[in-house]
Amino acid sequence: MKFSDDSKLSGEVDASEGRATLQEDLDRLEEWANKNLMKFNKDKCKVLHLGKHNPGLQHRMGSTCLESSSVERDLGVLVDIKLSMSE
C-alpha cells in the first residue's frame, strides 16, 4: 500500500453548488487513490476555511468527516484563515 503525500485540493465554495462540486472532487480523489492501491491518512487531512463569511461547511473523504483547521503548512509556510503567512 502506498500513501499520497502533500496533496492539496482547493475550491471556491460560495453556494451549495460549490460545496457539492468540492465534495465530488474529494470523492473522485478517494476513488483514484483506491484504484491505484493508495490511501490518504485521513487523520492528517484537514480543511482550511478562508474568508470572513465562510460558513465552514463539513467535507468528507469516504465516510470520514474532515477536521477543520485554523492554520496549515504549505511548502514550509504557515497559512492561517486570515491568509497571514509565517515560517
Image (tube, helix red, strand yellow):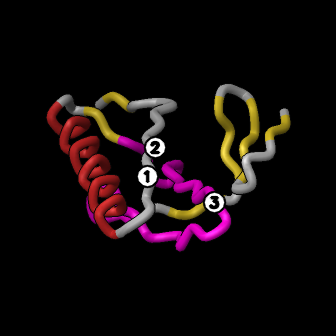
Q: Which residue lies furthest to the left in this view?
A: 35
Q: Which x, y percent locates residue 19?
A: 35, 62
Element at label 2? loop
What residue is shown with label 2?
A: 10
Q: How far apart are marks 1 and 2 (CA)?
A: 17 Å
- Which amino acid type corresponds to the residue marked 2 in the rendered image? Ser
Q: Are marks 1 and 2 in contact (CB under 8 Å)?
A: no
Q: Do the residues labelled 3 and 2 touch (CB within 8 Å)?
A: no
The segment highlighted magenta reads 40-65
Q: Which mark lies nearer to you, 1 or 3?
A: 3
Q: Quadrant of the C terminus?
A: top right
Q: Residue at x 40, y 31 (%)?
A: 4
Q: Dot 1: within a 10 Å radius of its alpha carbon, few (fewer than 14), some, or many (20 or more) residues? A: some
Query: Along the polypeptide, which appears first: circle 1 or circle 2?
Result: 2
- Which amino acid type corresponds to the residue marked 3 in the rendered image? Gly
Answer whether residue 80 is magenta in the image: no
Q: Distance between the residues labelled 1 and 3?
A: 24 Å
What residue is shown with label 3?
A: 51
Q: Which x, y percent locates residue 33?
A: 25, 36
- Which amino acid type corresponds to the residue marked 1 in the rendered image? Lys
Q: Dot 3: within a 10 Å radius of its alpha carbon, few (fewer than 14), some, or many (20 or more) residues? A: few
Q: Residue 42 — which label?
A: 1
Q: In which quarter of the image is the N terminus?
A: top left
Q: How far apart are marks 3 and 2 (CA)?
A: 13 Å
Q: Is 52 left or right of 15, judged from the image as shown?
A: right
Answer whether residue 43 is magenta in the image: yes
Q: Residue at x 63, y 60 (%)?
A: 51
Element at label 3? loop
Q: In which quarter of the image is residue 50?
A: bottom right
Q: Residue 33 — which label?
A: none
